[in-house]
Amino acid sequence: MQSVRLPWPPKELSPNSRAHWRRRHAASKSMRRTAHILCLEAKLRAHADGDIVLRLTLHPPVKREHDRDNGLARCKALLDGVADALRVNDKRFRPTADFAEPVEGGCVVLEIVEP
């Protein structure tokens, strides 16, 4: 199983955010680029065809209730960066997201599950 630790997406990327489109775009662009670089450094690889099963473990920065759907939607820019690094279309991704214990600053641990 391959894995990489990615930063926690900023609040502007939450579906419930009321951020201005320019701030949301800047945050999205930054997260996509960061995920791309970290995945290249981790030397992640994907199989040539078929679905790519991704397991996302979300470690929020604070301990409070989080909506699982919003957690996964918040990671859209990260998944786009992973797709860029793997050189695949993100429609092949089959992501699942689970929340875990909070860590300082928050993070997302992405694992590629081998078929």
Image (spheres, rainbow, N blue to C red):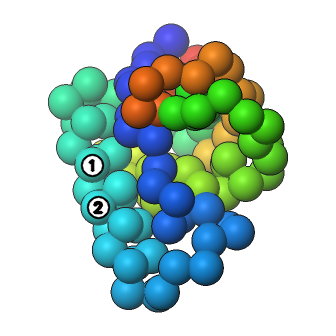
Callout 1 touching callout 2 (CB < 8 Å) = yes
Disc 2 packing (10 Å; few <14; some 14–19; many ≥20) = some
Q: Nearer the viewer, residue 59 or 105?
A: 105
Residue 113 x %, y %: 60, 21
Residue 112 shown left or right of residue 93 in the figure: left
Percent coordinates x, y for residue 114 in the rendering: 58, 18
For the residue pair 57 and 93, the one nearer the viewer reads as 57
**Which SS class for mark 1?**
helix
Label 1 packing within 10 angstroms: few (<14), some (14-19), many (20+): some
User: In the image, 46: left or right of 44?
Assistant: right
Q: Amino acid at mark 2?
A: Ser
Would you place residue 18 above or below residue 15 in this image? below
Question: Going 44% across and 17% down the picture, which residue do you hit?
Answer: 2
- What label sits on residue 34 in the rendered view? 1
Q: Residue furthest top?
A: 1
* Mark 1 to mark 2 CA distance (whole Å): 6 Å
Q: Secondary structure at mark 2?
A: helix
What residue do we see at 68% from left, 40% from top? 95
The residue singled out by tag 2 in the image is: 30
Residue occupying the point 47% across, 50% down: 9
